[in-house]
Image (cartoon, grey):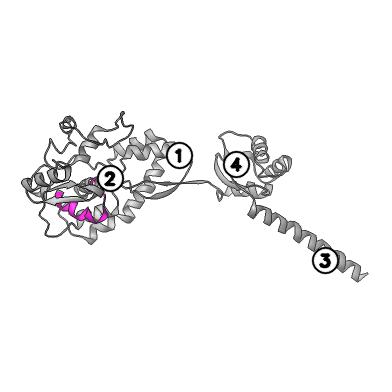
Amino acid sequence: MKRVLLFLTTSVLLFVACIWGAKIYLFSNGTPVVFTISSGESGAKVAHELKKAGIIRSEQLFKIILKLTSSASDLKAGTFDLRQHMSELEVINCIKSGRCTHYEKITFPEGWRSEEMAEELSARGITDAHEFLRIVRAENLEGKLFPSTYLFSADMPARTVVREMLAQYDKKIKPLFSQYTTDLTEQKLLILASIVEREAVVHDERPKIAAVYLNRFHIGKKLEADPTVQYALGFNLQENRYWKKGLTYKDLKTDSPYNTYRYAGLPPGPICNPGYESVKAVLQPETDFDALYFVAETGGRHVFSRTYDEHSRNIKRIRGR
């Protein structure tokens, strides 16, 4: 009798272990599914869509467990990372706890203006572009939206998105201000860094480009930076992009305080959101570098010169005139 009971007990335990192991196997190996719950959806509707996506096996069991453990209101609207063949209870707990919230990976390159960021955020379903821009403009945050890779959930408040980007700015950029000595205010430094960001193509030229603009700024000479004109022109319908290529003489005459060909000194604010290296270049420009001009040559590099005559000769040589 004892042997029979031992056999039965062992068999039951093995059966339970097999069931549990199968569930773990199916869950860990199930195909990932990005699942969205819309605002106001009923528990029955959610159950039906979960079954349809192959995430759960039984709508009825899902509704029963949901009723016993919580309510449909606990299944908040959002997008979640689930897998096929999950247990009904796992799905409910995962969504309720927020552990399964789906995050979009979004990368903002150095040198993007806030409008470009806003459009990307909107296109990815992360936040409202108009509200994002309203906050940025109202609080003069251009230049402080740190370009980096972020994980954002769908339909985030614009204020939350801005706060996360500013937190990265505080973490990555602000420490530089205490590491290097400068007579520039934070705003002026960011303005110059944003110009350097749009001008530099080759990394090791940033300190030289920064030195040129600092030299011009300190002697009161117009910066004459093409990117400031591009910023002033805004979105170019013909090219379907910001940062118009091939500026014309007419473009250089654009009446805007951002046009550094028309107005001396710095523009009113940063023209883009610079990265770490461009900010550092303004804080630590090329030493003993008295160049006032530069012109682009093949490959993205620049030729620097001290005088306008030298600069003119470089232009003729590079452009074959």
- Tell which circle, 4 or 2, labels the residue nearer the N-terminal end: 4
Q: Give the Cα distance between marks 3 and 1.
A: 53 Å
**Residue 185 can be seen in this image:** no
Determine the main secondary structure of the stretch shown in magenta.
helix
Q: Secondary structure at mark 4?
A: loop
Residue type at the position of mark 2: Gly
Q: Pick whichever of labels 2 and 1 is earlier in the sequence.
A: 1
Q: Are marks 3 and 1 in contact (CB under 8 Å)?
A: no
Amino acid type at mark 3: Thr
Tell me: residue 183, above or below residue 241: below
Q: Quick check: is 240 in the magenta stretch?
A: no
Image quarter of residue 65? top right
User: Magenta stretch?
Assistant: 196-212
- Specify which label sits upstream in the sequence, 4 or 3: 3
Q: What is the spatial separation of the Cα atoms under label 2 and label 1, in whole angstroms?
A: 22 Å
Residue linked to disc 1: 124
Disc 4 marks a residue whose amino acid type is: Leu
Residue 278 image position (x, y, % from top left)? 25, 52
How many labels were placed on the picture? 4
For label 3, the residue is 10
- Viewed as shown, does residue 294 lie left or right of 176? left
Of the pair 102 and 313, the residue shown nearer to us: 313
Q: Which one is in front in this view, the residue at disc 2 or the one at disc 1?
A: 1
Q: Is residue 141 left or right of residue 131?
A: left
Residue 148, percent from left and from top = 37, 50
| Disc 4 target residue | 75
Side (left or right) of 292 relative to 151: left
- Give the CA distance from mark 4 to mark 2: 39 Å
The residue that label 2 is drawn on is 143
Residue 153 visible in the shown view = yes
Mark 2 vs 1: CB contact within 8 A: no
2 and 3 marks in contact (CB < 8 Å): no
